[in-house]
Amino acid sequence: MLRIGRIVACVFFAATSAQAQELAGTFEQLRVLVKAGDALTVAGTAGQPVRGKLVNLSSSSLILNVSGTNHEFQKVDVNTITKRGSDSLKNGALIGMAVGGSLAAVGIALTVAEGGADAALFVGAALVYSGIGAGIGAGIDALIEGQRVIYANPGSPRARLSVAPVLRGPRKGVLVSLRLTR
């Protein structure tokens, strides 16, 4: 019983890393993601983020209409640009599938350990609950809408977060690391 609990803990705390999706690195690439009239938030190298509607985008600058006044931003003065949009359904479906399948695996593994079920039931239940979890995860992601970074200046810092279990020797725990790169 304790062995199964350890296996489940390892599955849930398996080393993963979170990384941002690929972003536009030039204003030319950004043209594919935006059109005139889109609401954008520009975080520049100096000052607070500015929110407005896109008026014009060239290869070296963009113009936002902020409360009736046009503001021009040169490419070198822009760190990031965000746009309101929906979250990808893929990550929610994958997370839901992992949670549903893991819960089924734990329940059936405990039943099998007590001699009350066979392996075919294990596989079938894991598949069914994985599908249910995937549907629930995708549904939750469909409801999430927020700011997405669509442009990042190649010179601005990027972050990478890693989480991994520590199960060797007398020490047990979780190793969390954050790496900033330019």
Image (tube, rainbow, N blue to C red):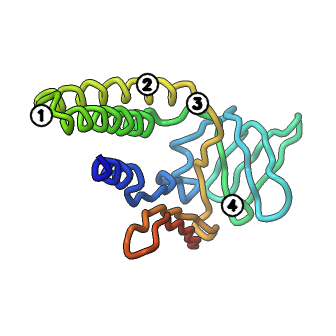
Looking at the image, residue 95 lies above or below residue 15: above
Q: Which mark is residue 70?
A: none
Nearer the observer: mark 3 or 2; the answer is 2
Q: CA distance from mark 2 to mark 4?
A: 35 Å
Query: Which residue is disc 1 drawn over?
Result: 119
Whether the residues at callouts 2 and 1 have beta carbons within 8 Å, the answer is: no
Label 3 element class: loop
The crowding category of the residue bearing disc 3, from other C-alpha atoms within 10 Å (few below 14, some 14 to 19, many at least 20), is few
The crowding category of the residue bearing disc 2, from other C-alpha atoms within 10 Å (few below 14, some 14 to 19, many at least 20), is some
The crowding category of the residue bearing disc 4, from other C-alpha atoms within 10 Å (few below 14, some 14 to 19, many at least 20), is some
Query: Which residue is disc 2 drawn over?
Result: 136
Label 4 element class: strand
Q: CA distance from mark 3 to mark 4?
A: 25 Å
Nearer the observer: mark 4 or 1; the answer is 1
At horizontal 40% and vertical 49% (from top left) the residue drawn is: 12
Whether the residues at callouts 4 and 1 have beta carbons within 8 Å, the answer is: no
- Relative to residue 67, is residue 117 drawn left or right? left
Reading the chain from its start, which is encountered first: label 2 or label 4? Answer: 4
Instruction: State the residue lying farthest toward the bottom.
Output: 169
Reading the chain from its start, which is encountered first: label 3 or label 4? Answer: 4
Quarter of the image that includes the C terminus: bottom right
Q: Amino acid at mark 3?
A: Ile
Query: Which residue is disc 4 drawn over?
Result: 79
Q: CA distance from mark 3 to mark 2?
A: 13 Å
Reading the chain from its start, which is encountered first: label 3 or label 2? Answer: 2
- Relative to residue 48, is residue 88 drawn left or right? left
Query: Which residue is disc 3 drawn over?
Result: 144
Nearer the observer: mark 2 or 1; the answer is 1
Give x and y (percent) for residue 161. Answer: 53, 62
Label 2 element class: helix
